[in-house]
Image: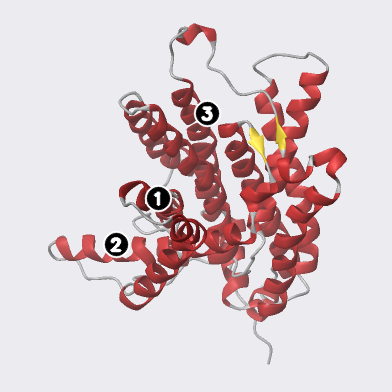
Amino acid sequence: MTTTQPDVSTAEPPPGRPSPLRRLLPGAPDAAPAGGSTLLRHLVPVVLAGTLVVLLTNQLPPYQNLQVARVCAFLCVTAGYTVLVGLNGQLSLGHGALMATGAYTVALVQRAFEARAVQGRWILPLSLLAAVAVTAAAGLVIGLAAARLRGPYLAGVTLTVATLVPAIATIFTGVFNGEQGLRFPAETPPAFLGAYFQPERWLAWVALLAALLTMLLMANLVRSRFGRSLRAVRDDEVAAGLAGIHVARNQVLAFVVSAACAGLGGGVYAMLTATVAPGKFALDLSLFLLMAIVIGGLGSLAGAVWGAVLLVALQDLPSLVTDTFTLPAGLAQRLEGNLALAVFGLILIVVMLAAPGGLQGAARRLTARLRPGRRTPHP
């Protein structure tokens, strides 16, 4: 006797049992209320968060505004990365290379317009759109290979990408200018903001807009039927296939989405310094990105925020130590290359032992304990 398998991409959870998406995005309702709009529910907190950050940038000095902009650039990457790894279960070690692809695309497009004396406020958005398109195409190629690979084999292929892309810049020096990298016109504030408007604040606003747009799109994606299909594939590919989900197609699309987010983040990251070089996208950047989403909370967009903040804070740690303490030149140089990675690894071990759900999981459990009459969720 044959039985019909339920479509796990649309099936509702049994009464009293939380849906998979509720476990993925803590605090979110299992389904949109009747007559409600998922987009609107996500748009309201995004607008509020953007308003708070804009008000914050008005009070910060230039360097700290650049730090806010860097957090926003990395948030574009970690938001898409956590969808790929946490929601779909595909391990990638090549997102630093995808960031480099987006950054070099922005640099080449900007330089092309500069060479032709073309100016306009539309150039930067067009450059970032080109970065998203090029990295999405690269993600499609990688995703087609990823759909045939699993576990360490997939990690090995993406690790090869992480080392290959920066190397291309040093091989084709006529296009990418080797280790010296490419410089392009810096983004300046619009004239209507005044002649004395802080350029770093304007960069923070542009990066914030990119991050908020990414978070809005990813939040709606994970609450969509496509998001449920991605999680079903992650949990059990055989069951997902029997339920009518095209496993390979969903895996490829997950890679494309994540790569597009990485390209946008890389383009914004390059915009902050108006330069791009292979040294900015070394292999350790891909490792940092992976550790960031694991420490923040794998599969949680709020965890992606934690991860982006940690990335900026720990990358600045060696400079903070060397500026605070008088160290020998040799020791300071070793710390510059190894301290951030060592501290990041230590934090990863501590978080995995003390809070397997990451910082966001720990914050969620702490909040539940502080609420009277609420049961502490399982990690």
Q: Position of residue 134 (x, y in %)?
A: 77, 43
Q: Position of residue 174 (x, y in %)?
A: 87, 39
Q: Earlier in the sequence, mark 3 or mark 2?
A: 3
- Name the residue located 71 percent from the left edge and 30 percent from the top edge: 127
Question: Where 226 sits versus 266, above or below?
Answer: below
The part of the image, by quadrant, that contains residue 367 is: bottom left
Q: Does residue 246 show up?
A: no
**Picture quarter with the C terminus:** bottom left
- Name the residue located 72 percent from the left edge and 77 percent from the top edge: 153
Which residue reaches farthest bottom?
1
| Mark 3–mark 1 distance (CA, rounded to whole Å) | 20 Å
Q: Residues within 10 Å of mark 2 (few under 14, many from 20)?
A: some
Mark 1 falls on what kind of element?
helix
Residue beneath label 3, please?
206
Callout 1, which amino acid?
Ala
- Name the residue located 77 percent from the left edge and 55 percent from the top edge: 167
| Mark 3–mark 2 distance (CA, rounded to whole Å) | 30 Å
